Image (cartoon, helix red, strand yellow):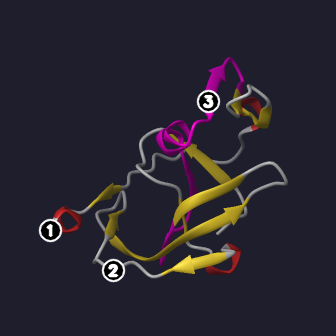
Amino acid sequence: MEDVWIMDSGCSRHMTGHRKWFSGLNPVSTKEYITFGDNGQGKVMGVGSISLSAKLSLREVAFVRNLGFNLVSVSQLLDEGFEVRFKKGVCCVLDAEETLVFRVDLTSVSGPARCLVASPSADIWK
């Protein structure tokens, strides 16, 4: 697993498989699973915070065992009051005062193309 975070407009929450990155990790009280693109599942083992930079800490990040990617949820950023702007070749995340929090260069993406799929299982609604 790499130290790379993927901006994901389809996942419902931030998630990673790196336990050591959490500054605090709280166990989840319900059985919650994430479904991977190959229909395999990973259990959400806890939820906590991770600092990505001096300006940005992700809250409510799911720790999912066996997750091979680190996902930043665009919808969760928006829910937390950030603004996410996609323009040709760049993605910018701004805070409520429109100060740049971080910028992602989309032109330097390397490696094979991948399509990632994650969806919560029906068990979370019980």
Name the kind of residue labelled 3 in the image. Val
72 shown above or below 61? above
Name the kind of residue labelled 2 in the image. Ser
- Taking the spot 71% from the left edge, 30% from the top edge, the residue there is 92
Q: Nearer the viewer, mark 3 or mark 2?
A: 2
Circle 3: element type: strand
- Left or right of 60, for residue 101: right
Circle 2 sits on which residue? 29
- Taking the spot 67% from the left edge, 31% from the top edge, the residue there is 96
Circle 1 sits on which residue? 126
Q: Are marks 3 and 2 in contact (CB under 8 Å)?
A: no
Question: In the picture, which quadrant includes the C terminus?
Answer: bottom left
Numbered range of the magenta stretch = 62-90
Circle 3 sits on which residue? 84
6 shown above or below 107? below
State the CA–CA distance, disc 3 to disc 1. 32 Å
Circle 1: element type: loop
Which residue is more in the foreground, 53 or 35?
Answer: 53
State the CA–CA distance, disc 1 to disc 2. 12 Å
Q: Is residue 78 magenta?
A: yes
- Density class for disc 2 (Cα within 10 Å; few <14, some 14-19, many ≥20) is few
Q: Tell me residue 52's x, y (percent).
A: 75, 57
